[in-house]
Amino acid sequence: MVNNFTRLSLQGKSLGDLYYNRTKNVGDKGSTKVAELSINRTLSKVLINPQPDFNFGRAFEENMKLINGHVTAGTARNNSSGVRVATIGGMLLPISDNKQDDVAGSEFDSFFVSGKDKHAVAKVRSADAFDKEKLVLVSTTENIATERGQAVLDDNGDTIINNYSLSFIEEGKPLDEDNEIRIMLSPADYEQAKPFLKYGAKLVPENLKFAFVGNDITDWAIYAERVIPREEGKLNKGKQEAKSTQEKANK
């Protein structure tokens, strides 16, 4: 299966300010108890599967925080076909608790987004999925727009391309579907990247977004703002580190 990642670490504070609402029953036959929280005291809600000893009798609108969060695959409630959905879990604590994430904030370098409109839900750690500094390009594919199984054409009669899939393998791993990393670029970003899109090219994707799909082909759809040659990425990183060191020295 392509992009088959077990879980991604999720930064709880990037969800927004969380306020406890109520208990909900989810999962197969509604057998899993989760906490429903309001985001920033709005009608936007998030369901969180908390630690085993979590007290579901907390006061309405109590300010909470999520520590050592993660997003993984779950099962939709009472769905006989077994549709899989993204599930957020972790340690849910009162906002006054001193416990912090075990993962450093700088490692949350990507976003978990909703599948339809790519709305950013929270920051996640891409290193839980793959090492973006070790990707090697093996193929590219155009993904055309379809409607009822037929290709959608523009006013000139040409097929409309939604995006392009870039297929990678991590260095040192065998080239098979279970190890394939598939990342998508918009047509405009693909055109900018074309000069270095060659078989075996060592490329680094930037500004990643992960959307949960959970079907028989792939668990995650991954979008990148761009891809750059690895050596260029190292050079840029070195410049940023040097700038940061200089700024600290000037303080």
Image (cartoon, rainbow, N blue to C red):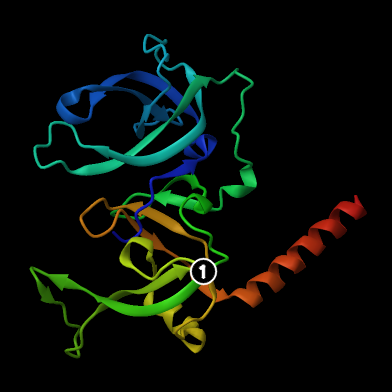
Is label 1 in a helix, a strand or a loop?
Answer: loop
Q: Is residue 140 above or below residue 106?
A: below
Residue found at the far right of this picture: 250
- Along the horizontal axis of the image, is 179 left or right of 62? left
In terms of depth relative to the viewer, which is nearer, 208 or 36? Answer: 208
Tell me which residue sits at (48%, 57%) in the image: 130
Tell me which residue sits at (64%, 71%) in the image: 233
- Check disc 1 and report the residue beneath it: 171
Tell me which residue sits at (36%, 33%) in the image: 46
In terms of depth relative to the viewer, which is nearer, 234 or 23? Answer: 234
Q: Quadrant of the N terminus?
A: bottom left
Q: Is residue 67 above or below residue 163?
A: above
Tell me which residue sits at (42%, 13%) in the image: 53
Q: Is residue 126 above or below residue 204?
A: above
Q: Residues within 10 Å of mark 1 (few under 14, many from 20)?
A: few
Q: Amino acid at mark 1?
A: Glu
Q: Residue 208: where, in percent of width, then height?
A: 48, 60
Q: How many marks?
A: 1
